[in-house]
Structures are given as structure tokens and as C-alpha cells.
Amino acid sequence: MPGLLTKGRAKELIEKFPQNRILVVGDLMLDRYIWGNVDRISPEAPVPVVEVTKETVSLGGASNVANNISALDGKAYIIGVVGKDPKGQLMKKLLEERNIEPLLIEDSNRPTTEKIRILAVSQQLIRIDRESKEKLSSDVEKKIISKIKEILDNIDAVIVSDYGKGVVTKNVMDFLVSTDKMVFVDPKPSNFHLYKHITIMTPNKKEAYQSINAPEDMPVEEVGRKIMEALEINHLLITLGAEGMALFNENRIVRIGTKAKKVFDVTGAGDTVIATLAMAKVAGGTWEESTCLSNYAAGYVVGEIGTATVDRQTLLSLVP
Ligand SMILES: Nc1ncnc2c1ncn2[C@@H]1O[C@H](COP(=O)(O)OP(=O)(O)OP(=O)(O)O)[C@@H](O)[C@H]1O
Ligand SMILES: [Mg+2]
């Protein structure tokens, strides 16, 4: 939306990105993709046999949010839980390669969360999840909070990336909102009650409706207002997929559209939204400006194959 953000202003904000220091707290995941060809059905069971040709692993969940911060040249710190397993080591290595500071807690009671997708002829055949959704022990929860305390003086804002795997608890949220930092939350609807008094939340449309059990025919404006009332928050950003976003800023609602796009891969769009929003806000943007920039960033990543991030130069080039 040209009216909300000029090119000059975007440049001013983006130039400040390297000074930003952002802490991501949440559920870390590894995304593993296994590609192959299918030529035959297994003799053992009526299932296809995939001959593996390629395997990749990338940062998912909260770690993808940190990856987006890093791609925008912000300093990203991440606090989360991994298993005491080789995949936890791999997570740490991938984060360090991306210049992300991993402040990880190893929990011997759970595996490192991993989502494995097996794809043949560009089609996903199956997804395999390795994870625990059990509550964290109070010992691990205390470690999370003390790590947050340790890093607090070095950061400008916090992003909570909640995928419902246990890191985001009432005590963690209560501690975060008790600090003087802005708290950006990508929510899990079932944890809705934990997000009182945060700075802003960025649910997609489905999550927004789910979080207050709103009927389908309720207008999104009303859903947003009810969420803000229930959580006693002043800012809310509901992402609307191809229809863009609705920003609720105090009493004002701003709708931002997208350029209709051929979508290659929508996964991770939400991670790009919250990362860019926080980067722009910390750089001094208004909520409208920051939202607008995040909308450009997300519109870009959904059109890219295999890239889940955008860099500063590309981001600026997206602003007309
Ligand atoms: N088809 C599209 N064309 C252009 N932009 C899109 C499209 N789909 C998504 N976007 C952009 O991505 C943003 C987030 O999309 P969406 O509301 O689907 O988030 P999400 O469901 O949280 O994504 P995720 O799968 O990462 O969790 C949108 O607000 C918009 O900016
Ligand atoms: Mg999302």
C-alpha cells in the first residue's frame, strides 16, 4: 500500500536493521525433506517405494523466525528446547551457520522436534513427525526463564513463536510481559489464554477465529475486537493469506491487500511476517509502516521455491 509506506521511509527503516537485536523464544523444529522417484509398489505392502535422490534439512518453527531475522541482518538470539540427541546438535550447528545465537536447553526427556516430508514427483507422500507435546518439567521451564533474564539487557524486543510443543508456558509469558520489552506473539490458538497484555499477536484467519470460537459468519473486524478485549491488548495483526492483512491499531482497523501471486510455497509466510514486523517496529516504524513491510516480505517468500527468507536489498526493491 503506497499510502502507508513510501520508498524513502522503507529505506530509512531497512538501513537500521543491522542494529536490531531480537530474541526469539519458542518451539524449535527441523524441517527435513526427502525427495525421490517412485517406480514400483512395494512387495511387502501396497505402498510406493521411494528411491531417495536428495535430502535436505532446514530450520523450522521458531528457528525459522530467527532465520528470517538473520536474513534481514538483525542479530537473532533463540531460546528453546532440544533433545539430548544428534538432531539437537544439528539444530545448534544450523543456527550457528546462520549467525543465530543458540541459547538452547537440552532435555533428555524429549526428542528434538523434527518434521520429515517425503516427496516424489513434487508431491508430498507422507509426513512423519518426531516430537513431544508433553508439558516441560518445571526444571526446564526455570532454565528457560533464567536464560531470558540473562539476555534481556542485550535485546530490543522478543518474538514468541508458539507451535504448541511446550516451550511457551504461563510462567514464561508472565515473565516476558513483566519486562519492558515489546512482545510479539505468533500464537497457538489453544494457548490463547497465555497471551494477556502482550504487545501484538499475529494469528492467521483460522487461528483468530479458533482462538475465541467465533462462528464463521462473524466479520473479521468483530473477531479482532473481541480478541483485543479478551487479551487486553492494543495491537493485533490478522493475516488473511492471499487477501493480505488486517491491522488493528488501538481503535483503528487498516486492511492491506496483496498483489495476487502464484504461490509456490506458503509454509513459513507467518514466520516472515512476524520477523519483518518486529524488525521494522524496532527500527522505529509505526505499526502501519511495519505491517506494510511485513506484507511485502511475506508476499515475496510465498512466491519463491525453497527460500523461506528475504534479504534487505530484496525487501527494499519490493516497495514501489
Ligand atoms: N497467495 C498469496 N499471495 C500474496 N501474498 C500471500 C499469499 N498467501 C499468503 N501471502 C502473504 O503471507 C501472509 C501470511 O499468510 P497466511 O495468512 O497464510 O499466514 P499463515 O497461515 O500463518 O502462514 P504459515 O503457513 O507460515 O503459518 C499474508 O498476510 C500475505 O502477506
Ligand atoms: Mg502461522
Image: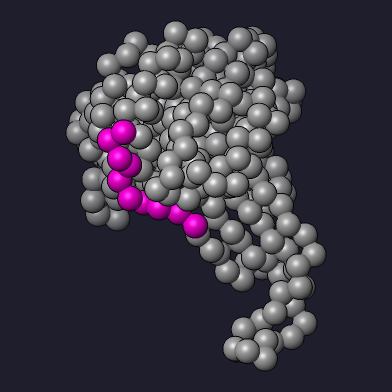
**Looking at the image, can residue 312 be seen?**
yes
Q: Position of residue 135 (x, y in %)?
A: 30, 45
Q: Assess whether residue 25 is covered by the magenta stretch.
A: no
Q: Residue furthest bottom?
A: 43
User: Which residue is at 80% across, 64% downward?
Assistant: 53
Report whether 274 appears left or right of 90.
Answer: left
User: Which residue is at 67% across, 66% downward?
Assistant: 119
Report whether 202 appears left or right of 213.
Answer: right
Q: Position of residue 57 (x, y in %)?
A: 67, 49
Q: Assess whether residue 137 is covered by the magenta stretch.
A: yes
Q: Is residue 81 above or below residue 276?
A: below
Q: Quadrant of residue 146?
A: top left
The answer to which of 253 and 167 lies nearer the viewer is: 167
The answer to which of 122 and 298 lies nearer the viewer is: 122
The answer to which of 224 and 182 lies nearer the viewer is: 182
Q: Position of residue 34 (x, y in %)?
A: 69, 61
Q: Is residue 139 above or below residue 36?
A: above
> Could you tell me which quadrant the C terminus lies in?
top right
The answer to which of 202 and 249 lies nearer the viewer is: 202
Q: Position of residue 103 (x, y in %)?
A: 51, 26
> Could you tell me which quadrant the N terminus lies in?
top right
Q: Main secondary structure of the magenta part?
A: loop
Q: Quadrant of residue 318?
A: top right
Q: Residue furthest right?
A: 53
Q: Which residues are magenta?
A: 130-139
